[in-house]
Image (cartoon, helix red, strand yellow):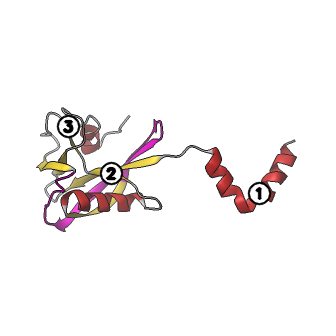
Amino acid sequence: MRRLIARLWRLLRPVQSRVMWFLNAKFVVGVTGVVRDDEGRVLLLRHRMWPPGRQWGLPSGFAHKDEDFRQTVVREVKEETGLDVEAGRLVMLNSGFRTRLEVAYEARLLGGELHLDPFEILEARWCRPDDLPEDVQPVCGPLIRGETVP
């Protein structure tokens, strides 16, 4: 029986990716950037669309189809703040949120002028890792401190 299935699978080679697409779960990917400046401060944003009491967080957004996640960080930071960054190492990869995957990268400030997208962002602050706003998203503290995120 296994040989028959293996042979059938090989015959389906031209359409294997389509078969796999139909058989597997589909995800949206939320991508976050832990943006640091030369002084070691981290960029925090107060997001308009996030729940009251948890509006402060890191720059983030959803990856576009066929977009490299590092490029998502660069694009989202630019869209939300006008700043230019370079994405670095992967610092978080979490799944298990139904159809969402969460990814975070360290990012280094390259330059640009702070100009907030008023539709998404209410305020921006450069914060020291030990001086974060009270209502920061719970995942931000560990990411900023370089700890493992559960």
Mark 2 or mark 3: name the one nearer the start of the chain. 2
| Eye-nearest disc, 1 or 3 | 1
Give the crowd class for mark 3: few <14, some 14-19, many >=20 residues within 10 Å. Answer: some
Asked if disc 1 and disc 3 are in contact, CB closer than 8 Å, the reply is no
Q: CA separation, marks 1 and 3? A: 50 Å
Q: Nearer the viewer, residue 73 or 150?
A: 73
Query: Can you see residue 106?
Result: yes
Mark 2 or mark 1: name the one nearer the start of the chain. 1
Residue designated by label 2: 61
Q: SS at mark 3?
A: loop
Query: Can you see residue 32?
Result: no
Classify 72 as above or below 92.
Answer: below
Residue most extreme to the front: 119
Majority secondary structure in the magenta region = strand
| Eye-nearest disc, 2 or 3 | 2
Q: CA separation, marks 2 and 3? A: 17 Å
Residue designated by label 3: 136
Q: Amino acid at mark 1?
A: Leu
Question: Where on the picture, by quarter, is residue 52?
Answer: top left
Boundaries of the magenta span:
90-119
User: In the rendering, at what x and y percent does residue 26 appear?
Assistant: 53, 46
Compared across the picture, whether 130 is left or right of 32 comes to: left
Residue designated by label 1: 12
Compared across the picture, whether 66 is left or right of 36 comes to: right
> On the rendered image, what quadrant is the N terminus found in?
top right
Residue positioned 17% across, 67% down in the render: 111
State yes or no: residue 93 in magenta: yes
User: In the rendering, at what x and y percent does residue 69 appear?
Assistant: 40, 57
